[in-house]
Amino acid sequence: MASKTNLGGVFLTDLDNQITSDVVASTEAVGGIIFDTALVGGLATALGAGTAATTFANGNIVELNSIDDMKAAGIDETVMLGLPKKHLDDFFTLAGNGHRLFVSFMDSTNDADFTAVEKMQVAAGGIIDHIGVWTSKPISAREDVYTKVANPTGNPSTNGYYKLSGTSYVAASETEVAANTDYYLKSTALAVPDDNVLKKLELQAEVLGGKCGVTNYDGNAPVVIVLNAPIADEVEIDYTELPDLTAYDFPKVAMMIGQSASSATHALQLKLIDQTNATFVQVGNIGAALACLAVATANESIAHVAHFNLANVTTTAELGFGNLVVTGTAGARAWGAAAAYTNINTLSYQKRNQYLHKKGYCFLTTYDGLENAVFFSSDQTLSQGDYCKISRVRVINKSRRVVRRALLPYVHDDWDVNAATGELSQVSLSIIQDIVVRALNANMVEPGTNNAQISGKKVNIPAGQSILTDDALNITYALTPRGETGIFNVTEGFALTNA
């Protein structure tokens, strides 16, 4: 009887027609980080006279793939007081070498609108998925809590002062004006003011990727932005009085707060504060956030406990503000005896939830029972809509790139139409619909795997479109995102289990 197996050897098969593929190169791991040098006096002061001064001159965008690349670019403890080195060290420590990270320096004194974001994406050919921004520009200010303005909402006020309540102004009493106890986004109009850093970054993201609900003609390089910025330029900031960011629809921006609670972090923070004007900034966590985004697939939250323990760069975490009292004069300041940075372990779950998470912040957090473990609290963006998570923004951005790449070869193609109606024939519609479906099937998976990044999809070409009129065809597609187990509610007790 013949053997069931064949004689051993190595045999090859050539496959034809493989050049045309539905798979496009994934860019979901490509990131960028921008350091605002205004705090230290601008680019020249920040970069010094070493190699970095040449490498990053005039806002040059440089791609770094390893610690060695960082050193070769001249980034060391002398560049911007060591802040960029700290964050890039964190990035490569957590993500490892080999990841694509574009780096640049800007000065918000001259680039007030943060156009450095657009410049970075354009220089990278539109492939960047996420950009981190570190700036000393605060997102709010105590002195502008109440602004004397003309009555914008019809609410009478005898003193002409109004306070922002949600998205409307209401009259403010003299007592409230004098007390000036709460933090609000700096505002002189009903909407978030144009000079607010959160709004400026959202506008930059919209330039690159379009605005939700508006047809996008120019921005075909979508990006999500994560921000490290002070809450306010104040010595004392009470975490219970942080501005509520949830009323503002900035789906492409995430506000990150927190830093490592270490002596090295406090020494660096003191150097940053020890400038002529003593701006009260935090060191932040932007390097760690970018590292998590570099490793996470588009559909994965950077708060995933199993995958994103930050212990290699921080074993304990704090908000980095509370009472940043310093003594001495510029160039010789020291922390005061009452200095406090609000360690996260001093805040209960309810306080973290009420005063930080519910107000729209992503922060460094811990979980009882997990020692030497620090995580991001969530990946929420400043939106209450469908794009309320960084992961959802990344998934939709990836799908946009995929669908656009799939359809571009068919621009100005000719198709069979129904001679009676001028509409595309059913066969033509089916072909086009299949192009989009195949592109989503092939690409909306974790790179190098078949693991789906979405739960479902629907592609539709509405009927009744006469393509002979304007050569235009409207296509809609919808994705069902994957679910996230953010909370487990467990009930326990004693019972007879064999009854």
Image (spheres, grey):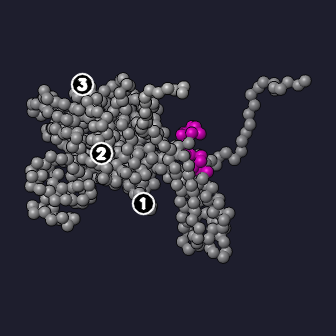
Circle 1 or circle 3, nearest the eye: 1
Report the front residue among 498 and 436: 498
Screen quadrant of the C terminus: top right
Q: Which residue is mark 2?
A: 359
Disc 3 is placed on an element classified as: helix
Image spot of residue 13 (x, y percent): 74, 37
Q: CA distance from mark 1 to mark 3?
A: 47 Å
Q: Which residue is mark 3?
A: 263
Circle 2 or circle 3, nearest the eye: 2
Circle 2 or circle 1, nearest the eye: 2
Query: Please, what is the three-letter code of the amino acid marked with disc 3?
Result: Ser
Residue 147 appears in the figure: no
State the extent of the magenta-drawn residues as a range.
Answer: 438-451
Q: Which residue is mark 1?
A: 213
Image spot of residue 284 (x, y percent): 29, 36
Within 10 Å of the Cα at label 1, are there few (<14), some (14-19), or many (20+) other Cα atoms?
Answer: few
- Residue at the image position 61 percent from the left and 58 percent from the top: 433
Above or below, 194 relative to 89? below
Q: Earlier in the sequence, mark 2 or mark 1?
A: 1
Query: Please, what is the three-letter code of the amino acid marked with disc 2?
Result: Lys
Query: Please, what is the three-letter code of the amino acid marked with disc 1?
Result: Gly
